[in-house]
Amino acid sequence: MTGTKAYRFDLKGFFAEEDGAVTADWVVLAAAVCLLSIPVLTTIGNSTQTATTEVAADVIANSDR
């Protein structure tokens, strides 16, 4: 078995690598944006539902004339 040292896993080298650090940063950033958008979308959804209900009530009230 020649060449087994070339395929040996180097734990110190693995932790010293910085190639995946940018990817990890973007994953964390994307997760934060997704989590922070939930309250905003909930607020917009509730406001839209309220406005729609009020418009529907006005249309019904004015259609009886």
Image (cartoon, rainbow, N blue to C red):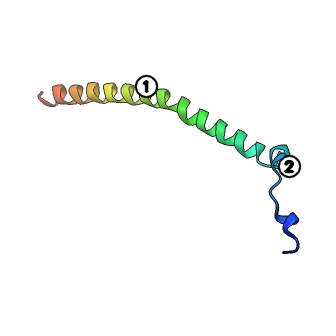
Q: Secondary structure at mark 2?
A: helix
Q: Is residue 8 left or right of residue 54?
A: right
Question: What residue sits right under mark 2 in the picture?
Answer: 13
Displayed quadrant of residue 27: top right
- Identify residue type, mark 1: Thr
Mark 1 or mark 2: name the one nearer the start of the chain: 2
Observer-nearest of 62 and 32: 32
Q: Residue drawn at (83%, 53%), measured in percent from left and top?
A: 10
> Where is residue 41 shown, x and y percent of the image?
46, 31
Q: Residue drawn at (54%, 32%), measured in percent from left and top?
A: 35
Q: Residue drawn at (30%, 30%), measured in percent from left and top?
A: 52
Observer-nearest of 64 and 37: 37
- Identify residue type, mark 2: Gly
Q: Is residue 25 left or right of residue 42?
A: right
Q: Is residue 34 left or right of residue 8?
A: left
The N terminus: image quadrant = bottom right
Q: Secondary structure at mark 1?
A: helix
Number of residue marks: 2
